Amino acid sequence: MMPALAALVTGGSRGIGRACCLNLAANGFHVAVNYRQEEAQAAQVVAEIEAAGGKAFALQGDVSEPGVAERMVQAVLAETGRLDVLVNNAGITRDNLVLRMSDEEFAAVLDTNLVGAFRLVRAALRPMLKQRGGRIINISSIAGMVGNPGQANYAAAKAGMLGLTRSVAKEVASRGITVNAVAPGLIDTEMSDAIKGRDQLVANIPLGRAGTPEEVAAAVAFLASAEAAYITGATLPVDGGLAAG
Ligand code: NDP
């Protein structure tokens, strides 16, 4: 029997990452559920997947730390023998108006959201190049496309992810590896609970509501599927029309 295809989802313990883990597992992937500190939540995601007949394991690692990406990719290879899909989902916010933003606030968001994603892309490409195939999906944000007051650090990191996506897509296209971004708008998670002026934001969404983590996961699962083989270097907004203009 062919071993199951394997997927690594960073920040898989809750929110959008959790929904990606559940969807990919339901689609037959053996899923590595990465988390930074909430071990119990990651274990809960693994338990849910196993209860539904899928395969998963929890994988601790802070993506902002050097060396962690390589260690996590090695751990996935040791557990599953392969790596077919990387979902760079782990992300943080440290919102502040730019005049008040500290170097630490700017650097922390860049280190997790952009540098962490870069290191995972680099580490994941090695097995993917050997396998002559793979899918990388970067969770950006519409903040990286249109900007957001109070989020200069976050928007810069998320815009950086789009440049990373397009450049790596061109580098590895000839090797059967696709690299795409998903740009969520306002999605109901713990992260968006903290957003200031949430009601005003919802009022500006053409579809009239926030999205769900499952709706983002559906786009990720599509980009990870065989049907998306001809899509690379693209950014798919999942935002209820917010970035449409
Ligand atoms: P949550 O805050 O709900 O979850 C964040 C996840 O990332 C957790 O699993 C957390 O793990 C993990 N994480 C955070 N830092 C690290 C780190 N250094 N290393 C490893 N894992 C880490 O976020 P969302 O689900 O809302 O967001 C997921 C992604 O989607 C983020 O990249 C975010 O920027 C993006 N996004 C979200 C939007 C929204 O409206 N919610 C809109 C647009 C984009 P732990 O619990 O262990 O800390």
Image: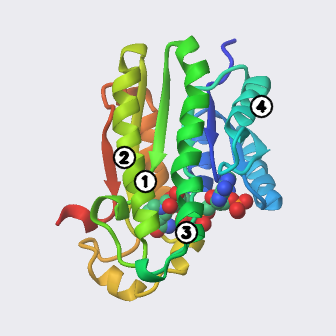
Which residue appears at 79% of the width and 24% of the height? 78
Q: Nearer the viewer, mark 3 or mark 1?
A: 3
Residue 5 in picture, x, y percent from top left: 61, 25
Q: Which residue is mark 1?
A: 140
Which residue appears at 48% of the width and 83% of the height? 100
Viewer-nearest residue: 223 or 22: 223
Residue 146 in picture, x, y percent from top left: 27, 64
Q: Which residue is mark 4?
A: 75
Viewer-nearest residue: 37 or 70: 70
Q: Nearer the viewer, mark 3 or mark 2?
A: 3
Across the whole image, how many numbered discs are drawn on residues? Answer: 4
For residue 30, side relative to residue 134 (left or right): right
- The three-letter code of the residue at mark 2 reads Leu
Tag 3 and tag 1, C-beta contact below 8 Å: no
Q: Earlier in the sequence, mark 3 or mark 1?
A: 3
Q: Which residue is mark 2?
A: 162
Q: Secondary structure at mark 1?
A: loop
For residue 50, side relative to residue 112 (left or right): right
The vertical placement of 115 against 179, above or below, is below
Separation of marks 3 and 4 at Cα, in angstroms:
33 Å
Q: Earlier in the sequence, mark 2 or mark 1?
A: 1
Separation of marks 2 and 1 at Cα, in angstroms:
7 Å
- The three-letter code of the residue at mark 3 reads Asp
Quarter of image, res 128: top right
Q: Earlier in the sequence, mark 1 or mark 4?
A: 4
The vertical placement of 153 against 127, above or below, is below
Residue 56 in picture, x, y percent from top left: 74, 39
